[in-house]
Amino acid sequence: MLRTHSIALVLFSFCFSVAAAPLAEKTKIILPHLQRSTESQYNYYITLLDMALKATIDKYGDYELIISDIPMRQRRQLLSLGEGKINVIWSATSQERETNYQAVYSPLSYGLFGYRVFLVNSQTLPQFKRDIDVDWLKKLVGVQGRDWPDTEILLKSGFNIKTSDYKSCFALLEKGFADYFPRSILEVGEEVSYFADLDIYIEPNYGLYYPNLMYFFVRKDEPLLGKRILDGLTKIEQDGSKWKMFINSPFYQHSKKIKQNRHFFKVDNPFSSEKSRQLAEAIYQQQRY
């Protein structure tokens, strides 16, 4: 018997059809709302999750992915996950998040989220057109989002960071209240396009690197869902389809150009768990991308 499942999107839609086990009960999985400025990544994570779940239908049964109709920033997503209003999120990890939630230990973006480049405005861009070092950078004012793991990493390393909500970070940068805004090489290209009306640019020569992995997270009281996702991700990693989808994504293709011929200052991440630190180091040494 054929059964179908669909991803119901609020702002855009697509669907998938699969053959499922006849007696399997459909598992409903609620996901966060779309964030427009990083839409291609959002699609990537949802499609990756769908591939993992599809690869495990024979063992775990059919499923339905449902998009929440409530826009959520990162902190709200974590709170909603804990409250059971959503079932899966994807996020940069930290020891705290791995303690409070169940991390699915299969890195989603192969460590590239830890490569950060600087958004700047037209007034600060000329300051970077010379040899700089980390100490010089720490004298400037950076901006980051509230409750981001990146914020704590940079503050702990001695950077001068002010915080705001996501969209306000771009406004603060444009208006000169911050000198630079570190962004992942995977997201910055799409963000610059989305905020094209603002006076912001990608600084071409420098960046930061610290161990920073992206995982799917579920609640601690849903261990079967976490195991299912991990089993599925392992399958699609082994058959090469996970890596193929990643390297064919538009944000990865753009990130290769951004990363090329750029000097990255390496920064420690003291908020990483030992397991994630080891995974990140293995990926960094492999230099697969």
Image: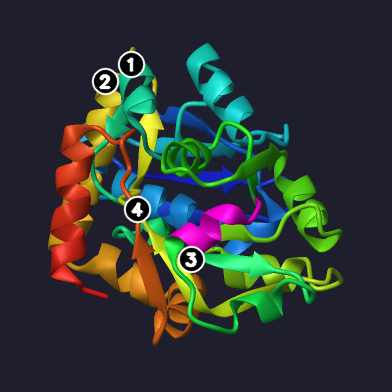
Nearest the eye: 23 or 94: 94
Give the residue pinned by disc 3. 186
> Is residue 24 among the parts visible in the rendering?
no
Badge 2 amino acid: Pro
Viewer-proximal residue among 18 and 108: 108
Determine the residue positioned at 61% across, 44% down. Answer: 161
The secondary structure type at the circle numbered 4 is: loop
For discs 3 and 2, the disc positioned in front in the rendered view: 3
Q: CA distance from mark 3 to mark 2?
A: 30 Å
Q: Magenta segment, which residues?
A: 135-141
Q: Specify which label sits upstream in the sequence, 4 or 1.
A: 1
Task: Tell us which disc is closer to us: 2 or 1.
Answer: 1
**Mark 3: few/some/many CA within 10 Å (<14, 14-19, 20+):** many
Q: Residue 251's spot in the image, x, y percent?
A: 50, 71
Q: Position of residue 239 (x, y in %)?
A: 15, 65
Q: Quadrant of the C terminus?
A: bottom left
| Mark closer to the observer (1, 3) | 3
Residue placed most toward the observer, 235 or 249:
249
Task: Name the residue carrying label 1.
Answer: 220
Amino acid carrying label 3: it is Leu
Give me the disc on residue 119: none
Name the N-terminal-most of marks 3 and 2: 3
Quadrant occupied by the N terminus: top left
Q: Residue 113 at x, y = what percent?
A: 41, 57
How far apart, in angstroms, are the residues tagged by discs 4 and 1? 31 Å
- What secondary structure is found at the residue carrying circle 1? loop
* Separation of marks 1 and 3 at Cα, in angstroms: 29 Å
Question: In the rendered structure, does residue 136 fall within the stretch colored magenta?
Answer: yes
Residue holding disc 4: 267
